[in-house]
Amino acid sequence: MSQFENVTVVKKANVYFDGKVTSRTVLFADGTKKTLGIMLPGEYEFGTDAKEIMEILAGDLKVLLPGESQWAHIQGEGEFIVPANSKFKLQVTEVSDYCCSYINE
Amino acid sequence: MSQFENVTVVKKANVYFDGKVTSRTVLFADGTKKTLGIMLPGEYEFGTDAKEIMEILAGDLKVLLPGESQWAHIQGEGEFIVPANSKFKLQVTEVSDYCCSYINE
């Protein structure tokens, strides 16, 4: 879907890595949460609390998921899933637009 | 207000200046529109179609409004208004978080 309807948006941005990664929080009526974010080129490591489904809407990046030794390469659109309470690495080579869904299990 | 409720959010980001300025579009039930955006340090010139109310939520920037010869300096929170169909310049010195309201007159 190209837009989220009947949602709540938190006004202030979430800012990481000196603004090279930023996002806005979107809250859904069913109590779930997503963030819509932008990553500028750079190398980043993130940690998860909840399980995350990362949908890449546009961009170019490589991701190293926890326990993996091979980087996955996403150009344009793609998706990857990160387990709860883990860490993953990103090498972003083009401005990347993403939608991250937080899954409480 | 710290969040917008019962709104529609467009999933894809608006990306300008190689991603140094990005925003998400928020649509309201009354037909009005706002964008929530981030500007990284840099110098930018923007043009307006509708009148814009730019609320700075955080950051540090100077703005030169159309017809003015003096730059206004906003540190932290602030606001400025840009007439429709005009141009304004920004010198952003710290990552700046903004909410732009588009006013159709």
Image: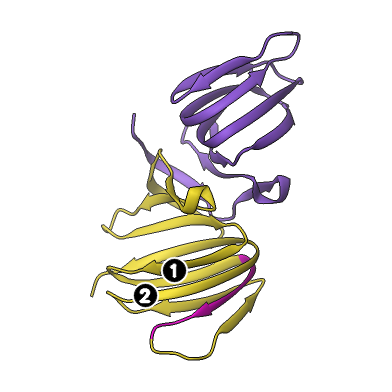
Chain colours: A yellow, B purple
Asked if the stretch drawn in magenta spans residue B84, the answer is no
The quarter of the picture where residue B70 lies is top right
Q: Is residue A39 above or below residue B35?
A: below
The quarter of the picture where residue B90 lies is top right
The answer to whether one can see residue B92 in this image is yes
Between B79 and A5, the residue placed more toward the observer is B79
Q: Tell me the residue that label 2 is attached to.
A: A87
Residue found 44% across the figure and 90% down from its top: A68
User: What percent of the width, then of the height, locates residue B11?
Assistant: 54, 55
Query: What type is the residue that disc 1 sits on?
Result: Glu
Between A45 and A28, the residue placed more toward the observer is A45
Q: Tell me the residue that label 1 is attached to.
A: A45
Q: Which residues are magenta?
A: A58-66
Between B70 and B5, the residue placed more toward the observer is B70
The quarter of the picture where residue B17 lies is top right
Within 10 Å of the Cα at label 1, are there few (<14), some (14-19), or many (20+) other Cα atoms?
A: few
Q: Secondary structure at mark 1?
A: strand
